[in-house]
Image (spheres, rainbow, N blue to C red):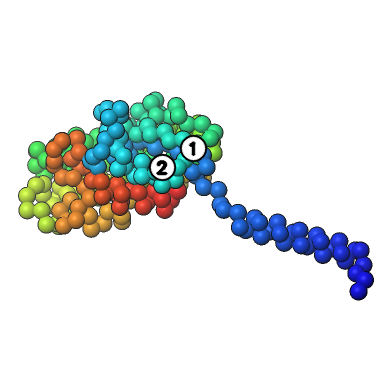
Amino acid sequence: MHIPASRRLLASTLAVGTLVACALAAAPTAQASSGGYAALGDSYASGVGSGSYISSSGSCYQSTLSAAYLWQQANSPSSFDFAACSGATTQDVLNNQLSGLNSSTTEISLVVGGDDAGFTSTMETCVLDGTSSCVSAVDTDENFVNTQLASRLDTLYSAISADAPNAHVVVMGYPHLYAVPGDCLFGISDTSRSAINGAADVLDGVIANEVAKYPNFTYGDVRSAFSGHEICTDDQWLHSTTLPVYESYHPTSAGQADGYYPVLTANE
């Protein structure tokens, strides 16, 4: 049967188009692991509390059991800039942790803001000085978060965007520390525990609001991941007062692996 040349050309064109479409459909979506990964932030980002610290990280206490380290092991990025450091504020991240970012960086994780508000000293106040002093200290922290933290976060997020223009940034927040009421027989009062959890809500709210302003940023809320695993539960993923002292009120290795890591992967 003779097929006109025009129809043969049309059929050939359709066939090629079909093959191209199939190839595009079959091609895997580009993953962050095709570029570099940077883990930025404070002690919750470096993995304080989870042990297995990298000796060369010194007092930054970067852990091989942190969510960031677990992510790079699972995804094999082209480079891994583990810059997170215990005690880091937004200004510390801005000054000391962005040098490894560039146009090849495609994935960034960040946890920061708690040290800006002074939550470490507040926890000391709550443990040592009683309910009234605790609530007062928490109120001071919340006032700072509500009036000053947003501008600091905005400055940092803008710098990250400029230094790593091709990166997707997952900014994660902080969990509730306590189950209220919980099964703890000793320690701080339920009033203090509720105040501390409320401060986490305020902090997470400000962080989430700032993240929403940046198209390539995603907010990862860890509170639901830690629900049922706070201090004063039977399966807690957070240290209470412990030794070494710097691990107090930080996620355990389970908190990193089962709390932070799934939130990071869900939002990458």
| Cα gap from disc 2 to disc 1, whole angstroms | 9 Å
Q: What residue is shown at x 25% (from left), y 46% (from top)?
A: 253
Q: Relative to residue 65, is residue 7 drawn left or right?
A: right
**Residue type at numbered disc 2:** Gln
Q: What residue is shown at x 39% (from left), y 25% (from top)?
A: 95
Q: What residue is shown at x 27% (from left), y 53% (from top)?
A: 226
Where does the N terminus fall, quadrant-wise? bottom right
The answer to whether residue 25 of the structure is visible from this angle is yes
Figure check: 220 above or below 90: below
Q: What element carries label 1?
A: loop
In the picture, residue 153 is in which quadrant? top left
What residue did someone put label 2 on? Answer: 72
Number of numbered markers: 2
Q: What element carries label 2?
A: helix
Instruction: Locate residue 211, reporting x and y percent.
Output: 43, 44
Binning the other alpha carbons within 10 Å of mark 2 as few (below 14), some (14 to 19) or many (20 upward) gives: many
Figure check: 30 above or below 87: below
**Residue type at numbered disc 1:** Ser
Binning the other alpha carbons within 10 Å of mark 1 as few (below 14), some (14 to 19) or many (20 upward) gives: some
Residue 257's mark? none
User: CB of mark 2 within 8 Å of CB of mark 1?
Assistant: no
- Viewer-proximal residue among 91 and 257: 257
Q: What residue is shown at x 10% (from left), y 53% (from top)?
A: 184
Instruction: Locate residue 171, reporting x and y percent.
Output: 40, 43
The answer to whether residue 220 of the structure is visible from this angle is no
Instruction: Locate residue 169, reporting x and y percent.
Output: 45, 42
What residue did someone put label 1 on? Answer: 78
Instruction: Locate residue 46, reporting x and y percent.
Output: 31, 37
**Please, which residue is most extreme toward the bottom here?**
1
Query: Could you tell which of marks 2 and 1 lies nearer the N-terminus?
Result: 2
